[in-house]
Image: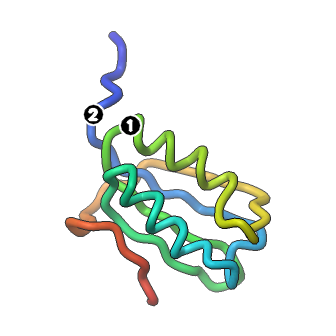
Amino acid sequence: MEEDPNEVRGRRFLVEGRVQGVSFRAYTEREARTLGLTGWVRNLPGGPVEVVARGPRHALQALERWLWQGSPLAKVRAVTTRAFVGEVGADFEVRWD
């Protein structure tokens, strides 16, 4: 049976490299909203950025491709992902926690 590209799912992405201090969160928020995703992006201690997003599979795949590029000054070294089961808000936001 083929997977439905419009099925809503949740994913957690961990983005490593030079991704803090280069407007990565702001650019990610804009891209996620453009793709119609909900969730958040936040800096983690030690340098990585966490992105939690919920939406159609095709939009999550597009976000993952975009995360490998990131903001203009970012230097992405790795993007890892796994399923996310949990609640996200009704919008996509930058978290400061």
Q: Residue furthest left?
A: 90
Q: How is the image coloured?
A: rainbow
In the image, is residue 77 above or below residue 94? above
Disc 1 packing (10 Å; few <14; some 14–19; many ≥20): some
- Mark closest to the chain's N terminus, 1 or 2: 2
Q: Residue furthest bottom?
A: 97
Q: Residue at x 36, y 60 (%)?
A: 33
Q: Which mark is residue 57?
A: 1
In the image, is residue 43 above or below residue 68? below
* Labelled pair 1, 2 in contact (Cβ < 8 Å): yes
Instruction: Report, in whole angstroms, how far the alpha carbon at label 1 lies from the one at label 2.
Output: 6 Å
Q: Secondary structure at mark 1?
A: helix
Q: Residue at x 34, y 54 (%)?
A: 37
Figure quadrant of the C terminus: bottom left
Left or right: 82 in relation to 47: left
Residue 93 place in picture, x, y as percent: 36, 74
Left or right: 19 in relation to 32: right
Left or right: 20 in relation to 35: right
Residue 75 place in picture, x, y as percent: 79, 65
Query: Which image quarter: residue 73?
Result: bottom right
Q: Secondary structure at mark 2?
A: loop
Q: Residue at x 38, y 37 (%)?
A: 57
Along the viewing direction, whichever of 84 and 64 lies nearer the viewer? 64
Return the residue at label 2: 7
Amino acid under disc 1: Arg
Disc 2 packing (10 Å; few <14; some 14–19; many ≥20): few
Query: Which image quarter: residue 27?
Result: bottom right
Amino acid under disc 2: Glu
